[in-house]
Amino acid sequence: MMKEIRLTGKTIVITGASSGAGYAAAIEFAQYHTNLVLAARNEAALEEVAAECRELGADVLTVVTDVTDAKAVINLANTANDWHNKIDIWINNAGVLAAGDFDVTPIEVHEQVIKINLLGYMNGAHAVLPFFKTQKHGILINNISIGGFLPVPYGAGYSASKFGITGFSAALKGELTNWPEIYICDMFPAFLDTPGISHSGNYTGKQLKPAPPVYDPKRLAQAMVKVANNPRSGTFVGSASLILKLTYALFPGLTTRLTGAVMRKYLKMASPIAPTSGNLFNTVNYGMSPYGGFGLAGKPRAHRKYIAAALAVGLVTGVWLTLLKR
């Protein structure tokens, strides 16, 4: 049985803490009177999150950090460790999305998505693992999403980055088998009601919305707290996440084709919008909150399980119809 960890007084680093899941995680961990080190590119937004966390009883330090800059991430780790002479938990969370036909989307956009999503997580792990090894304990939480196992048509760079994180994390787990008190924990949430999709690079020419069911980011934050108390290798957040994992594992080709068909149908009907690089290369000053306004705020709702079940039935039905046509 894994050792239970008390969160009070623990030093926790969260990247991408200025909005979305990172913001939600900061608020959730703050309630346990932790020492929070919040990192992101947007200093003003970070300070707003920090103020809210302090009101909840946390001690908070903000460090403006671009996770694509390895030296900046090393500075983040050094600063966090110097603050309370330890780093107990590091949450790799900073991430971006870019949507559009692969060959239409500028290659520098794909590169930036990979730099932030994949290399940013690698930079985080590379910076914190020496501290974990010196301490002989620590928890690295990777917020990967269902994109870590489910391809996203019209988001090829995103898929490359998320599949890359899954492989990178698996390799780390193999390396660290002789360090029993160092845990690598992967989170696979389904679609979340965060501003991330509003901040995304968009080269589809159409307004984007997350596919239902859309989950409260607080649910992911609560799952992170559970993992911090009882580390586990992989955690699926939301019924749809596990259902999609199983569906893709059983019918990878068909699931990918169906996902692409759904995306094309949505893009055909969606409202037009001008192309944008979103927050890929520079921070933005809109939508800096945990929620994106795409779902229902507050506690998880039971009816979402039924939505997830309907999603599963639709996928399975599509698979069987395709098979029968052969």
Image (cartoon, grey):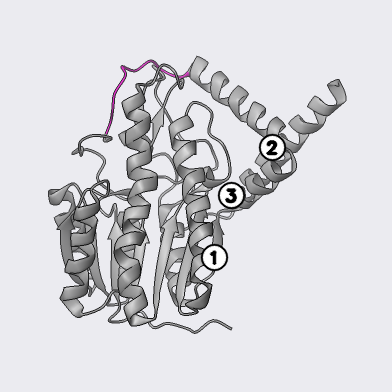
Q: Using the image as rendered, state which of residue 18 and residue 95 is in the foreground.
A: 95
Quadrant for residue 89, please give it.
bottom left
- Give the Cα separation between the discs numbered 1 and 2: 26 Å
The 10 Å Cα crowd at callout 1, few under 14, some 14 to 19, many 20 or more, is: few
| Residue for point 26% across, 35% down | 279
Q: How many marks?
A: 3
Q: Using the image as rendered, state which of residue 29 and residue 5 is in the foreground.
A: 5
Q: Which mark is residue 45?
A: none
- Give the Cα separation between the discs numbered 3 and 2: 15 Å
Mark positioned earlier in the residue sequence (1 or 2): 1
Q: Using the image as rendered, state which of residue 299 and residue 232 is in the foreground.
A: 232
Q: Which mark is residue 252?
A: 2
Q: Which mark is residue 241?
A: 3
Q: Can you give x and y, in whole percent of width and height, for residue 189 in the image?
A: 50, 52
Q: Main secondary structure of the magenta part?
A: loop
Whether 259 is drawn above or below 164: the answer is above
Q: Confirm whether the magenta stretch covers residue 277.
A: yes
Q: Amino acid at mark 2?
A: Pro
- Give the Cα separation between the discs numbered 3 and 1: 25 Å
Q: Amino acid at mark 1?
A: Gly
**Residue under pointer 1:** 174
Left or right: 162 with respect to 7? Answer: right
Whether 185 is drawn above or below 163: the answer is below
Evaluate if marks 1 and 2 touch, with contact meaning CB atoms under 8 Å apart. no
Residue range of the region highlighted in magenta in the rendering: 270-278
Q: Amino acid at mark 3?
A: Ser
| Residue for point 29% across, 74% down | 87
Q: Confirm whether the magenta stretch covers residue 36.
A: no
